[in-house]
Image (tube, helix red, strand yellow):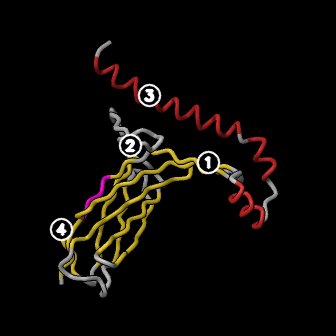
Amino acid sequence: MDKAMASTKRPLAMLAAVALCAGFLMVASAPNATACAPLTRKDVFKGLRAGTMETVSLRLLHMDLKFPKAVAIGNVATIKATVTRPAKEDPAGNGIPMERPYTQPAEDVIVGIGLSIGRVFLPGAGITDAEGKTTVKITIEEWAPAGKTVHASAYAWRVVQSTPCLTVQEDGYTARPDAFRTKP
């Protein structure tokens, strides 16, 4: 078998396995879903404590972020994010690197970005378009220190399926310890 064919079979096999697992989880939880159907707020919290309500996260999203070089205190940091599938790691989130023989834009994904500047934390969010792109704007507040390195963390997620007892979502995470600097 040639190298090109082998490199495409592995990711396709992994995606098929993930789809089967997700389908099995939905079928296996179907009887429980009918038992959870008439939920009150009290029932939801009981279910969460008892462990009968599940969230399955599949690490399927990859993010590319573009930061400015420097942002003055009081101005807006404009961060461009592009979200694609599949991720560069296994869907179970164990961090095992995987090849990406192809990429697909991820639409309607929520991208949350947090900036840490010393003891100051500034959040922002956006939702991707059909090309998997969004722009997150975060104001560098007056109380943030000038001349400091800004550390950024980003999390992307999209709920794929939601029932009263089971939620399946795809997600991705990245961090940039030296994203940009603040200036006076």
Q: Magenta stretch? A: 64-68
Q: Is residue 143 placed above or below 165 in the rendered structure? A: below
Which mark is first along the chain, 4 or 2? 4
- Density class for disc 4 (Cα within 10 Å; few <14, some 14-19, many ≥20) is few
- Density class for disc 3 (Cα within 10 Å; few <14, some 14-19, many ≥20) is few
Q: CA distance from mark 2 to mark 4?
A: 29 Å
What residue is shown with label 3?
A: 12
In front of the other: 48 or 150 = 48
Amino acid carrying mark 1 in the image: Gln
Q: Which mark is residue 95?
A: 2
Which mark is first along the chain, 1 or 4? 4
Q: Can you name the residue that lies furthest to the front here? A: 50
Asked whether the residues under the numbered discs 4 and 1 touch, taking CB atoms below 8 Å apart as contact, a structural biologist would say no
- Density class for disc 1 (Cα within 10 Å; few <14, some 14-19, many ≥20) is some
Q: Residue 7: percent from the left, percent from the top?
A: 33, 25
Q: CA distance from mark 3 to mark 4?
A: 38 Å
Q: Which mark is residue 99?
A: none
* Residue at (50, 48) in percent of width and height: 170
Q: Is residue 173 magenta?
A: no
What residue is shown with label 1?
A: 161
Amino acid carrying mark 3 in the image: Leu
